[in-house]
């Protein structure tokens, strides 16, 4: 098989893999001609410089946030505020949850709270060290407080919550001064536009139903 055929086959496989991820993340896939992945035979630019192409990363923050978005869509379908969360340990999702306040008639049943409880059951400990919590919306003070107590290594969230976000938008319980007994690394804005649009759509439809009554 020549180098050109090898690159074509690699790009074809990348297109199939990207389509699968797009289904999970609610993305519109790129045309196959625009997908660039690393192959055994690297391409060469017109200047003669070898162009090493990036590998599609199934362990990336974007991928795991896409999984959290899947959970948020479950909440949306159930008439709940569409927030979803997953918890990852050693590159593997160990807990999934979506907001179920109305379903369970429980004000504490936020996606983060349910995911943290499920993850503790999996690891057999209340400490979630070396774990990453992915959630589609910035945690509220209740959930941020739970993060402090459960001690995950990282928090990655989608869209900020200027009104009651407790990871930096309104207040910051995860990097407070004076500090609490745990700090974790925080990465905001991963798939933020998609997370925000889902929330906007939910509340827009809720207002339309209210106005129609």
Image (cartoon, rainbow, N blue to C red):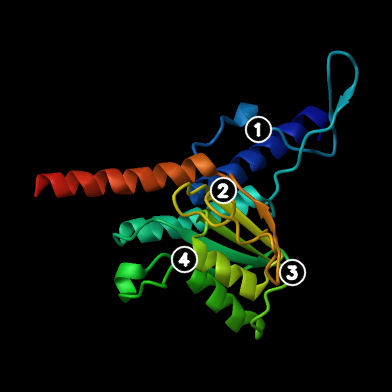
Number of the front mark, 1 or 3: 3
Number of the front mark, 1 or 4: 4
* C-alpha span from label 4 to label 3: 20 Å
Q: State the residue at coordinates (85%, 34%).
A: 41
> Where does the image place residue 129, in percent across and percent down from the top left?
72, 72
- Give the residue at mark 1: 35
N-terminal-most mark, 1 or 4: 1
* C-alpha span from label 1 to label 2: 13 Å
Marks 4 and 3: CB-CB under 8 Å?
no
N-terminal-most mark, 4 or 3: 4
- Give the residue at mark 3: 130
* C-alpha span from label 4 to label 2: 22 Å
Number of the front mark, 4 or 2: 4
N-terminal-most mark, 1 or 3: 1
**209 displayed left or right of 151:** left
Q: Secondary structure at mark 4?
A: helix
**82 displayed left or right of 185:** left
Number of the front mark, 3 or 2: 3
- Give the residue at mark 4: 111
Q: Secondary structure at mark 2?
A: helix
> Where does the image place residue 12, in percent across and percent down from the top left?
64, 37
Q: Residue furthest left?
A: 213
């Amino acid at each position: 098989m020549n180098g050109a055929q090898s690159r074509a086959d690699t790009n074809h496989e990348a297109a199939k893999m990207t389509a699968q991820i797009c289904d999970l993340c609610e993305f519109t896939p790129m045309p196959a001609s625009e997908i660039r992945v690393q192959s055994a035979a690297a391409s060469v630019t017109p200047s003669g410089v070898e162009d090493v192409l990036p590998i599609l990363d199934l362990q990336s923050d974007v991928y795991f946030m896409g999984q959290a978005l899947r959970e948020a869509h479950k909440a949306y379908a159930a008439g709940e505020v569409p927030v979803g969360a997953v918890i990852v340990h050693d590159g593997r999702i160990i807990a999934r949850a979506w907001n179920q306040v109305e379903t369970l008639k429980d004000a504490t049943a936020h996606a983060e709270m349910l995911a943290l409880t499920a993850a503790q059951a999996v690891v057999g400990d209340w400490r979630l060290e070396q774990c990453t919590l992915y959630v589609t919306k910035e945690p509220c003070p209740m959930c941020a407080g739970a993060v402090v107590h459960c001690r995950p290594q990282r928090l990655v969230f989608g869209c900020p919550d200027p009104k009651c976000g407790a990871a930096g938008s309104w207040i910051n319980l995860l990097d407070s001064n004076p500090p609490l007994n745990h700090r974790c690394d925080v990465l905001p804005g991963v798939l933020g536009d998609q997370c925000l649009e889902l929330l906007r759509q939910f509340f827009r439809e809720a207002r339309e139903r209210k106005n129609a009554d």
